[in-house]
Image: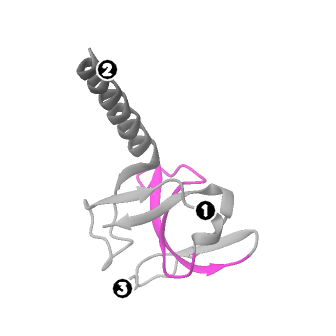
Amino acid sequence: MKKFFLSLVAALAGICLAVTVHCAFMTVEEQSSAMLPDIEPGQKVLVYLLTKDSDIHEGDIVAFESPYYTVGGENGILLRKVSKVSEESVVLSCGANMTQKEDMEISRDDILGKAVMF
């Protein structure tokens, strides 16, 4: 009987750990070439969702939801590099090899998480 309860507790602990990990991370696939050379099109990126605002610094790659819908363009969850951090907002830019500068400023609250592995 003791062995049964230990097995049950171990199984419940494993399920709780799996749910915690599932809720703390997500994968995002880069759809465009905007993040070259850091992230290639089609590459999947692991994003840590429990990132604190104070942990976001210049040079980090963050995930955020597109603030607008474009026809035939990027929609959904996007990845960009942080180029400037202020108290209320963050300025995001594309990769280093982009010919055009497409900086955008978003609120810190709009950031979903920080890329941890790509």
Q: Position of residue 68 (x, y in %)?
A: 59, 52
- Residue 71 among magenta residues: yes
Q: Which residue is mark 1?
A: 52
Q: Does residue 14 appear to the left or right of 20 in the view shown? A: left
Q: Which residue is mark 2?
A: 5
Q: Which label sits in the foreground, 2 or 3?
A: 2
Q: Examine the rendered structure and indicate whether residue 7 appears above or below residue 98.
A: above
Tell me the residue at 55%/60% (across/down): 51
Tell me the residue at 46%/48% (across/down): 24
Q: Position of residue 44 (x, y in %)?
A: 28, 58
Q: Amino acid at mark 1?
A: Lys
Q: Amino acid at mark 2?
A: Phe
Tell me the residue at 30%/67% (across/down): 118
Q: Does residue 67 appear to the left or right of 42 in the view shown? A: right
Q: Residue furthest toward the top?
A: 1
What range of the chain is rendered magenta?
A: 57-86
Name which of mark 1 and mark 3 comes first in the sequence.
Answer: 1
Question: Are the residues flagged by discs 2 and 3 in contact, CB closer than 8 Å?
Answer: no
